[in-house]
């Protein structure tokens, strides 16, 4: 899909991805080169989306998913991960020079999901597959492709992830059910209610006892990206931040 001027007004940018991309790319390099990479990424997004304004998010402190995760610690498999040397400096650059908003108590993904759902004429800019749960325009700068996610496809993506979990985030889902198997399980679902019922049946078949409802709810709540500031999982109040203008 090629975007035309006027298709979208506000680019909603996943600055977490930018941060780590620039930091790892310039590990052992001059941090100024990382700043140039950040600048180029923003300029590319503005050029491709033709957006006249933007909001960019970084994940801050706290995360409601930490309280939800009972079976395994949320992102507990990342605790000993080594961070790139320029991470803090690049983060400061994103905040001070590009006015990125830091969100606490939730993730940047959730902030993007809420903004796209609550605002008009927006496009989510990220390479994170989780955000395909959100209806509307999306731009993936890895594939350099813009797309539109329908409400049906957004819900199917959510139930696929509820079935498969996410090993990178320590979310178990149904063991041995990957993305391809999850798609097969949901292949003949033609409504959101069908998808939910089929997913619940898959959980019951694996977990066998009454625990399947608890396991399904835990995994569903862990993978679901927020779409409302009134989401019951949120413990911190979220307000859509001020819009910044492109150049």
Image (cartoon, rainbow, N blue to C red):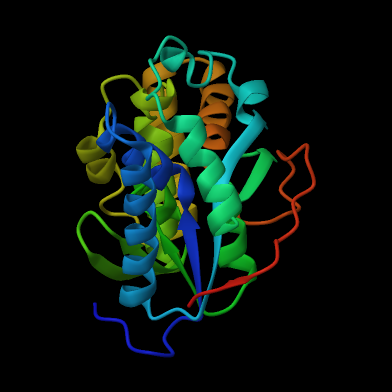
| Above-or-below relation of 191 to 28 | below
Residue 121 on image: x %, y %: 52, 80
| Outermost residue to the top | 80
- Nearer-the-camera pick, 112 or 23: 23
The picture places residue 63, in percent across and down from the top left corner, at 64, 30
> Which residue occupies the foreground of this view, 2 or 217?
2
Q: Quadrant of residue 60?
A: top right
Q: In which quarter of the image is residue 205?
A: top left
The answer to whether residue 233 is above or below residue 219 is: below
| Residue 35 horizontal side relative to residue 106, left or right | left
Residue placed at 23% from the left, 66% from the top? 145
| Identity of the residue drawn at 53% across and 23% down | 215
Image spot of residue 91 (x, y percent) = 51, 40
Image quadrant where residue 178 sits: top left
Residue 15 in view in this figure:
yes
Q: Quadrant of the N terminus?
A: bottom left
The reply to whether residue 109 is in sight is: no
Q: Which of 98 and 10 is in front in this view?
A: 98
Q: Which residue is drawn at 41% across and 64% down?
A: 152
* Residue 81 placement (x, y as % from top left): 39, 15
144 relative to 49, above or below: above
Residue at (42% x, 27% y) in the render: 203
Q: How many labels does the image show?
A: 0
| Left or right of 46 on screen, residue 209 | right
Vertical relation: 16 (above or below) 99: above
């Amino acid at each position: 899909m090629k975007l035309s001027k006027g298709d979208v007004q506000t680019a909603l940018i996943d600055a977490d991805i930018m941060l780590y991309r620039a930091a790892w790319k310039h590990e052992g390099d001059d941090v100024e080169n990382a700043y140039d990479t950040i600048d180029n990424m923003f300029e590319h997004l503005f050029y491709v989306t033709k957006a006249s304004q933007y909001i960019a998010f970084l994940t801050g402190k706290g995360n409601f998913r930490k309280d939800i995760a009972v079976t395994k610690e949320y992102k507990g498999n990342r605790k000993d991960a080594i961070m790139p040397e320029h991470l803090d400096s690049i983060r400061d650059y994103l905040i001070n020079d590009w006015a990125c908003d830091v969100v606490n108590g939730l993730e940047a993904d959730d902030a993007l999901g809420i903004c796209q759902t609550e605002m008009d004429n927006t496009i989510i800019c990220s390479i994170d597959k989780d955000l395909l749960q959100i209806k509307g325009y999306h731009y993936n700068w890895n594939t350099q492709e813009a797309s539109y996610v329908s409400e049906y496809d957004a819900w199917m993506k959510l139930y696929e992830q509820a079935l498969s979990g996410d090993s990178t985030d320590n979310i178990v889902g149904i063991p041995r059910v990957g993305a391809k198997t999850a798609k097969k399980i949901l292949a003949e679902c033609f409504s959101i209610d069908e998808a939910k019922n089929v997913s619940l049946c898959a959980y019951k078949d694996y977990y066998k006892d009454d625990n399947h409802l608890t396991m399904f709810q835990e995994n569903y709540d862990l993978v679901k990206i927020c779409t409302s500031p009134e989401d019951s999982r949120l413990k911190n109040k979220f307000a859509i931040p001020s819009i910044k203008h492109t150049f």
